[in-house]
Amino acid sequence: MKPRYLFPSDYMADPSANVFNGKLYIYPSHDREAGHAFDDDGGHFQMKDYHVLSFEDLENGDVTDHGVILDVDQVAWAEKQMWDNDCVEKDGKYYLIFSAKDYNGVFHLGVAVASRPEGPFIPQERPIRGSFSIDPCVFKDDDGQIYTYFGGLWGGQLQWYHAPEKLVEKGIDLGPAPDRKTQLYAPADVPALPSCVVRMSDDVMQFAESPRPVVILDKDGQPLKAGDPHRFFEASWMHKYNGKYYFSYSTGDSHFLCYGIGDNPYGPFTYQGVILDPVVGWTTHHSIVEFKGQWYLLYHDCVPSNDVTHLRSLKAQRLFYNEDGTIQKVVNE
């Protein structure tokens, strides 16, 4: 299978792929040209709604666009920038966890609920208590526990929570945290700022605990440094293969898609290598899923839009593992 553009009639990005009821469902963000100038904080990404796409056959079948499943105008607490989202099923209900900016310009995570994977989804009145930053990946483990991985630097505001003065400017009090770094960006020789993982409450509406750091170790067992081109930047994804936990992520400004392997959902995860070299466009946001006995990598690039306005298009290709459990590097064509 050559890499396939999945939905050429519209621009979508950040695909979160899940298998529900024998179908593959993709929950992307929905790019649009909003007339905002490009900046390093992603101000040009002014998404306002979510669609969901489904496939019976990812490689050759037609796509079904189920239309708008949630619009920013339906979310009382959100003003703009409906960025990445993901969906999980529990007890016959489907929970869409999404990121958006509130009216103070701060990103939070929200929850919307549906009785079907294609929605429509009904949002909660308020964001998840204590939530922050962007790019939620919702992972349901074999024991039924549900975890959300999240975080993104620069425009994703993750560094704000290591720089309390930035939140004080927004009228937000984080409370005492003596272990927080005060600099906005960490020096190159200190451990990289990590993403976060948190176990969800039984009703999938709130965090059941305080978020924990997702630590990525090098082969010597030391955390990756802030200056390492393979450190975390955004786009967390978690999947499980042969009993091991695979944490994959985008390195952002260096644009690699990298991964580490761990023994439990909290990590730490030992860095293994690069899955995909940089694509044309902004970051290498992705998901990894098994569907009908085949593993797939889903991601996006800006080739169809000529990267003029950073509008992105969804892609998919097969993914394979080596005998030792490492992932074979794939080539974007």
Image (spheres, rainbow, N blue to C red):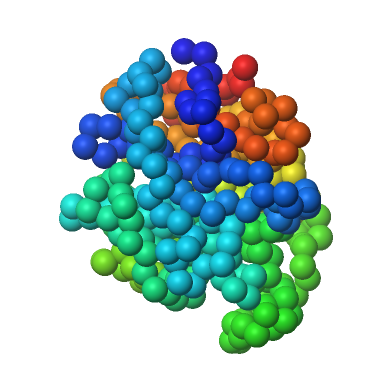
Q: Position of residue 235 (x, y in %)?
A: 56, 47
Would you say residue 236 is visible in this rendering?
A: no
Residue at 62 percent across and 83 percent down: it is 172
Give the left or right position of residue 40, taking residue 282 as reference.
right
Rendered position, 163 above or below 52? below
State the quadrant of the C terminus: top right
Residue at 55 percent across and 39 percent down: it is 13
Q: Nearer the viewer, residue 128 or 122?
A: 122
Q: Position of residue 292 (x, y in %)?
A: 28, 24
Figure disc tally: 0
Residue at 29 percent across and 25 percent down: it is 56
Give the left or right position of residue 295, taking residue 178 as reference.
left
Q: Nearer the viewer, residue 218 or 229?
A: 229
Residue at 18 percent across and 52 percent down: it is 92
Rendered position, 228 above or below 279? below
Can you tell which quarter of the image residue 155 is in?
bottom right
Q: Position of residue 289 (x, y in %)?
A: 39, 34
Q: Position of residue 103 (x, y in %)?
A: 59, 74
Q: Nearer the viewer, residue 204 or 124?
A: 124
Can you tell which quarter of the image residue 117 is in?
top left
Rendered position, 84 above or below 57? below
Would you say residue 81 is visible in this rendering?
A: yes
Give the left or right position of residue 142, taking residue 191 as reference.
left
Spot the residue most to the top: 1
